[in-house]
Image: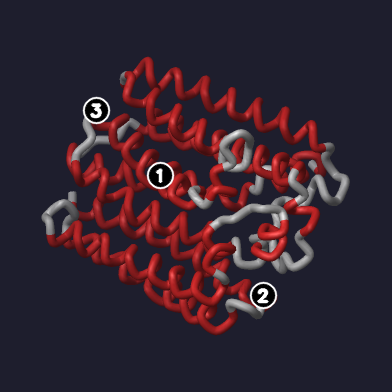
Amino acid sequence: MRYILLWLRAVRAPFFTGSVAPIMVGTALAYYHTGRVDWLLAVLATVALTLLHASANLSNDFFDHLTRTDDLNRSFASPFTGGSRVIQEGLVPAWQMLVAALLTMGAGALIGFYLVWVAGWPILWLGVIGGVTGFFYTAPPFRFVYRGIGEPFIFIDFGLLPVLGAYFLQARSFPAAAFLAGVPMGLLIMGVLWINQFQDSEADAVAGKRHWVVRLGRQRAAKVHVAVLALTYVSVFVGIALGMFPPHTLVVLLSLPLAVQAGKVVLASYDDLPNLTPANAATIGTHFVVSLLLSLGFVLAR
């Protein structure tokens, strides 16, 4: 049991809501359009994305260890930041993290090949884009996050692509509504990454990991975080105004207290890192609650 808990920590399992949420939204939207759900495909898609998510987390910890980003981090103040720390604490050798990253990527790919066989080649291209960009988020030679393009890839990999993929598995098409449904999911998961970079920013800057919180500074980045949260709700309103989302999706407004809390805390405590933790938690909560409520809106409208 201790070994299992150790590896759950290494893969940062509590963040797997980032994989469950977009599959749920894409599947619910397909149900709204078609009135049916292939539950096996939905579950397999969730498992495949979760394995690829685990692979990305493991490889990120490994390559951040090589650049000493996590070793230099002395200001991490919560479970939300600073990586899993299992390498830094000597609990797992770095090489095992890389092997585990490759194994979980391989397992996710195997499930993905079955989904391609069932649903067609578009699933392959979505999976390849997500898998490659997830692995090279911190891995050389691309190291997307070091170049300031990690945030857009998170938006794509855990927002647009999985919502589109989940929808395609159910309905075999890519309607404009599926693209738009990926926007709030992409914005919020990008917001989760964004706020979690605040506590890591000083060490990241020293290690050359120049994501946008480092580039902007925490004060300006706090305002961007609030804007990302606000744009999430705007995207839902746009979907309703364009007739792509049913009015039932206004139920997402029930999540506003969480989003407001996240925004208030980050504006007040962007430089007070220990007291910033509630913003990390509230942003993660907003992401998952919005995904639940948006999915519920689609289902109720059917």
Q: Earlier in the sequence, mark 1 or mark 2?
A: 1
**Residue at 47% across / 48% down in the picture?**
154
- Foreground label between 3 and 1: 1
Task: Report x, y in % for residue 278.
Answer: 59, 74
For the residues labelled 1 and 2, the Cα–Cα distance comes to: 28 Å
State the quadrant of the N terminus: top right
> Measured from the top left, where is residue 291 in percent x and y?
38, 55
Mark 2 residue crowding within 10 angstroms, few (<14) / some (14–19) / many (20+)? some
- In the rendered structure, which amino acid carries the disc numbered 3? Arg
Q: Between marks 2 and 3, how big is the CA–CA gap?
A: 46 Å
Compared across the picture, whether 53 is left or right of 152 comes to right
Amino acid of disc 1:
Ile
- The residue type indicated by label 2 comes to Leu
203 to 165, vertically: above or below: below
Location of mark 1 (residue): 156
Q: Is residue 73 visible?
A: yes
Other-residue count near label 3 (Cα within 10 Å), few / some / many at <14 / 14–19 / ≥20: some
The residue positioned 32% from the left and 30% from the top of the image is 38
